[in-house]
């Protein structure tokens, strides 16, 4: 019979002298050094990335703090022909991202870039004979920038870009250069809406509700463009042009009625000439009215065909006009002026927009 072999555990020979030499530096020390070096390298990489990556510049209300004085505008030259939709802006030495604020005045097809600088001649400098010396300061594609100029104020330089069409703009900063890129609203947002407040009646309820709805929509990556009838009268963009240039998905007009005292409620109108299967103008009108009525606890009157001459007939997309209430009725007029009531209407509009987004995307 074969004898079974016994497997004995291997015993490592240890030299006592060698142990004495290496025991002075324990193993945890090497572990601590390794992780220390690892974290130091990681922090260095993060700092390098933060210092070298482009800094995105955020937007703010430039025109409200510094009203635009066109009489003080200095025309600037636009040189070069870089990639379509890109403008390169050289800024004064030492300018940081926090020194730059922007505003998109889309109702005027105008984009403002304010640079906080002590220089009052960095842009628009000319020789005694009137020859501009700003060549290379601003370079871009003339097919999408119509004109550019600068206005100096107490806090710096305000660059004014008149654009060929409405876009969204992404600005990044690298060293002493700002890169401005025009982006189609449809590429930036999941859903695009044009809200068209018809008048300033009832303390501006139509515009106020539109603005409150736009704030709610931002959390859903939905963009609500709000028209400005005053700017339109001055030669600005029309609601139909704003729809086309932003490639908006739906149009919602807002206003009040004058039906005499003793009547109250909401109603909606649609364009009978525009029809698409699935979710058209009638569906949008019904959806907007229903959600606004439910949210505000008001009364639904009717969904009707728009009267002749309505803006709805110039819109080539699902469109509706919502009557928020009767301005001739004292009780409803008072209600339309209440903040809480406006919030409820805005919430109803937002609910209708999110429903329309889902219905149209499906």
Image (cartoon, grey):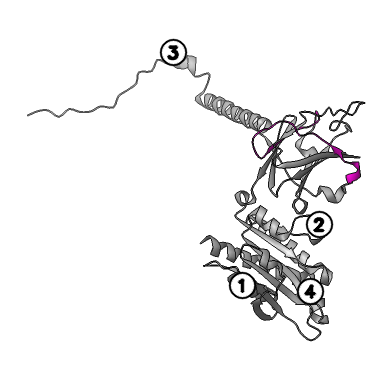
- What is the distance, in whole Å, between disc 4 and disc 2 at their CAs? 25 Å
User: Residue 296: where, in percent of width, then height?
Assistant: 70, 75
Q: Earlier in the sequence, mark 4 or mark 1?
A: 1
- Other-residue count near label 3 (Cα within 10 Å), few / some / many at <14 / 14–19 / ≥20: few
* Start-end of magenta stretch: 69-94
Q: How many marks?
A: 4
Determine contact: label 4, label 2, CB under 8 Å: no
Q: Pointer 3: what residue?
A: 17
Q: Is residue 74 magenta?
A: yes
Q: Pointer 2: what residue?
A: 231
Q: Of all residues shown, which one is farthest toward the bottom?
A: 262
Q: Earlier in the sequence, mark 1 or mark 2?
A: 2
Question: Which circle, 3 or 4, is nearer the viewer?
Answer: 4
Q: Name the residue nearer the viewer: 96 or 200.
A: 200
Above/below status of 239 relative to 135: below
Q: Dot 4: what SS?
A: helix
Q: Pointer 1: what residue?
A: 272
Please give the name of the residue rendered at 66% of the width and 80% of the height, measured from the top-left corner.
Answer: 302
Give the image quarter of residue 341: bottom right
Give the image quarter of residue 206: bottom right
- What is the distance, in whole Å, between disc 3 and disc 4 at their CAs? 93 Å
Determine contact: label 4, label 1, CB under 8 Å: no
The answer to whether residue 224 of the structure is visible from this angle is no
Q: Dot 2: what SS?
A: helix
Q: Name the residue nearer the viewer: 218 or 266.
A: 266
Determine contact: label 3, label 1, CB under 8 Å: no
Q: Specify the quadrant that holds the N terminus.
A: top left
Q: Pointer 4: what residue?
A: 336
């Amino acid at each position: 019979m074969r004898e079974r072999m016994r497997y004995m555990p291997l015993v490592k020979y240890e030299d006592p002298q060698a142990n004495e030499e290496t025991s002075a530096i324990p193993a945890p020390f090497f572990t601590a050094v390794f992780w220390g070096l690892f974290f130091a390298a990681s922090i260095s990489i993060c700092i390098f990335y933060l210092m070298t990556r482009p800094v995105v510049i955020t937007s703010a209300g430039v025109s409200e703090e510094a009203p635009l004085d066109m009489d003080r505008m200095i025309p600037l030259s636009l040189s070069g022909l870089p990639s379509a939709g890109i403008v390169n802006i050289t800024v004064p030495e030492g300018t940081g991202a926090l020194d730059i604020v922007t505003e998109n005045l889309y109702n005027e097809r105008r984009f403002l870039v304010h640079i906080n600088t002590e220089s009052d001649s960095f842009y628009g400098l000319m020789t005694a004979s009137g020859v501009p010396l700003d060549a290379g300061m601003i370079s871009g594609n003339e097919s999408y920038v119509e004109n550019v100029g600068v206005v100096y104020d107490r806090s710096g330089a305000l660059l004014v870009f008149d654009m060929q069409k409405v876009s969204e703009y992404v600005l990044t900063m690298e060293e002493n250069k700002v890169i401005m890129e025009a982006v189609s609203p449809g590429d930036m947002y999941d859903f695009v809406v044009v809200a068209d407040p018809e008048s300033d009646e009832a303390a501006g309820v139509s515009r106020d509700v539109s603005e409150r709805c736009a704030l709610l929509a931002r959390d859903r990556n939905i963009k609500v463009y709000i028209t400005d009838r005053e700017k339109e009268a001055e030669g600005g963009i029309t609601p139909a042009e704003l729809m086309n240039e932003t490639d908006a998905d739906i149009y919602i007009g807002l206003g009040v009625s004058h039906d005499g005292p003793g009547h109250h409620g909401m109603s909606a109108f649609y364009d009978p000439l525009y029809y698409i299967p699935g979710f058209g103008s009638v569906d949008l009108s019904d959806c907007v009215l229903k959600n606004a009525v439910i949210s505000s606890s008001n009364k639904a009157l009717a969904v009707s065909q728009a009267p002749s001459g309505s803006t709805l007939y110039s819109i080539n997309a699902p469109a509706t006009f919502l009557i928020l209430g009767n301005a001739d009725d004292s009780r409803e007029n008072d209600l339309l002026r209440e903040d809480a009531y406006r919030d409820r209407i805005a919430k109803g509009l937002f609910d209708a927009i999110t429903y329309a987004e889902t219905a149209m995307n499906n």
